[in-house]
Image: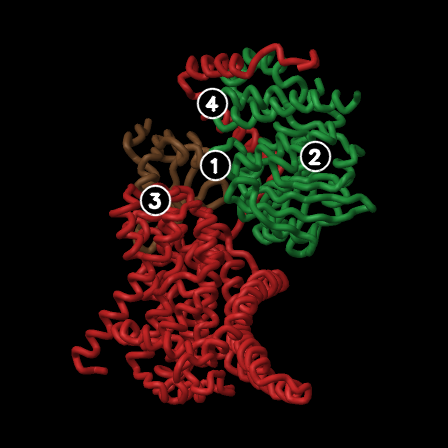
Chain colours: A red, B brown, C green
Amino acid sequence: MNGTVKPMTTLAEVCAEADALRLSSGNALGDAIVSDIYANAEEIARKVVAHKPQDKSAWDAKLDDILTSRLLGYPIMLALLGMVFWITIEGANVPSGMLADAFFAFQDRLTEWFQAAGAPAWLHGVLVLGLYRGLAWVVSVMLPPMAIFFPLFTLLEDLGYLPRVAFNMDSLFKKCKACGKQALTMCMGFGCNAAGIVSCRIIDSPRERLIAILTNNFVPCNGRFPTLIAIATIFVGGVFAPEYGTAVAAMVLTGLVLLGIAATFSVSWLLSHTILKGEPSSLVLELPPYRPPQVGAIIYRSLIDRTLFVLKRAVIMAAPAGAITWILANTYIGDMSIIGHLAGWLQPFGYAIGIDGFILLAFILGLPANEIVVPILIMSYLATGQMMEFDSLEELRQILLSHGWTWLTAVCTMLFCLLHWPCTTTLLTAYKESGSVKWTFLSFLIPTLIAFAVCFAVAQTARGLGLA
Amino acid sequence: MYVPEQRSSLADLKVGTTGKISSIELDGLLRRRILDLGILPGTQVQCVRKSPAGDPIAFRVRDTTIALRSDDASLIKVYPG
Amino acid sequence: MKWYQDTPCRETHGRVLREHFGVAAEAGQYIIALAGNPNVGKSTVFNALTGLRQHTGNWPGKTVDNAQGAFTYRKKPFLLVDLPGTYSLLAHTVEEEIARDFICFGEPDATVVVLDATCLERNLNLALQVMEITPNVVVCVNLMDEANKKKIAIDFPALEKELGVPVVAAAARKGEGLDALRETLYQVSTGARQSNPRRLTYSAAVEEAVQKLLPNVQRLVDHKLNPRWVALRLLDGDKAFLESISRYLDLQLNWEAPQEVAAL
């Protein structure tokens, strides 16, 4: 050590001395230190803080009385969830239509340019009919609901409502031997399951954190909402008068989310009693005061951090997926396209779970991002191997009906969408957070098995009863 | 003189009533957490509300609201105050 | 007695920051740590100071969020490092360990502790703990707007006198108090403003044990850390702290060798 300042006492010696002192005091020094620091804080606060008399009926206490009341606590949570969905669906309709019109108008222009430049048909197909259209669908269908859902959600977060959700839900999680903070991670999952899994860091117990990571996928993320919304609106909402359509679709969506929550609890319970056995640990949850929301920060956080982030990811995935799907749908082996062959091979599996080979294939090809499942499906349905121009859900309905969709297909597709495997980003995040291939694989396997089992049961029951 | 009930704990406090901490019979990380939040012997704590299912329970301590599960709260002993 | 060094060695400092904390500071940049309880508007303060010049990631080797952001004030560059929100620094969780190690071993030029004006007592607990580690503390009492609504009055001159470090009142959501915070940070970082942090009073048993341990601790940490604080941690039986401190002391000894080689 070159003879420079060398400690004359080693750390080990000092530690031994400290340990001796600590034990001689009956191991109470640690507690005494905490108490003493607080005593200092109390003394200072007494000198500098003056509480003026306040009327006891502070509004936030009243609000908490309602939001966490025995009678209204759960119904209010449910009503808020339904309302957020209703506003999202209702508000997204018009801008979605406008975006779609704009995108498809521009597509005609693109086609003209390709023709003028004398580009070969396949190039036009890959780039315009595949890549561009996939992109156009994702942006026009995803952007408006996200731009409404995320700010609404961030508003609830900013107000301080989410800790109350955890407070209300904790006893259920405790019964599953999990942590109430899992409710907060599920809330994050509505935005994006990958973000939800990252937020599982707030759970202290490693066992309970793993449970939260493995079940986060049962909360439908924003990539799956457009699919659920579209099918719910077409097949359920469409049955009712138009003015009730949105409300009914919102109710269906709420019901699906409840089902997802039920799956979360069941799987959490199952894990706690099998491979992740253990006793529930403790919960220490601060309920911060309600605070007036900051509109600027909400808009910034929800639009820049969340909406654009999720959209960027979707676009990156959708562009190549659109191109690849077009190629698969337009490359013929024998008298059938590759997609036709693949779908044909998957048909028996699809049929068994109430959907068809094309839908199952779309879910498989949609592994990189759930947002692209519907565009892939439409592209592969259409005989011409390209997405038809549609700017209304009515046209989507026609496409689906002409490919043999029944109410059972719609229900099973929604169920499969809700319960099936996580997207690659989510799996990657689960790997990063758990640091284990085994748990990552389970986070894929569990939802997959459940999705197949539930859809199979529903399809077989419905058929057995002669309902479909 | 009032003799405090021996086994009374935070979990026994009725909503709206207060008590002072006499001892914290938890251990490990949870014990340190509780101490760090300022729930210390002698600290006054008010039970402010219970979750719809009755558990967890929210307490007011040092101008903040902290929710604890009743199992844990029952190990934090209080005396009237 | 002054236990702290006036000029930490920049070279080692840069290395410690990079390797242990993933903080890559540019030459001449003042490092500011941002500490605070959860739910005190710490991220609002962070965003208000740094704007869009942010970088987010994880702390090295940990699954805990790390955010850093740059800002310039009076032509001086600052790097603001957002520490995990914690109630304490007694290190019972990874978050507390990260926050404590950064304040202690990352040697920031100043540490801001954001407090919630509506529950000052509990928040002071953290501020006092930070002040035991480093004298370069700026206390930012945030959420003054909420405190005013709740008719809570805080005597700021008295608070500053009690703490012995600069105190700034703020309502970061409304942008109030941020200029004062920047100015105070500037003064503390550049050394223009010296603090004399309150020395905490401990009960007799603790104080007695500290005094017994102090001479040897003083020799061990050699003015690099506050010996009182180190003694308290050892008495607390904080095992994770032992690992951190031995790693740090090793580093302090090892850098001297390469430096002398470079001098040849």
Q: How many marks?
A: 4
Q: Give the left or right position of residue A299, taking residue A174 as reference.
A: right
Q: Is residue C110 above or below residue A195?
A: above
Q: CA distance from mark 3 to mark 4?
A: 28 Å
Tell me residue C117's x, y (percent): 60, 45
Q: What residue did someone put label 3 on?
A: B69
On residue C93, the disc is 1
Amino acid type at circle 4 is Gly
Q: What residue did someone put label 2 on?
A: C14
Amino acid type at circle 2 is Gly
Residue at 36% across, 44% down: A207
Sequence-wise, which precedes: disc 1 or disc 4?
1
Amino acid type at circle 3 is Arg
Q: Mark 2 and mark 4, same subunit?
A: yes
Q: What residue did someone put label 4 on?
A: C237
Q: Is residue A151 above or below residue A408?
A: above
Residue situated in front as seen by the camera: A181 or A214: A214
Amino acid type at circle 1 is Thr
Q: CA distance from mark 2 to mark 3?
A: 45 Å
Sequence-wise, which precedes: disc 2 or disc 4?
2
Residue situated in front as seen by the camera: A43 or A196: A196
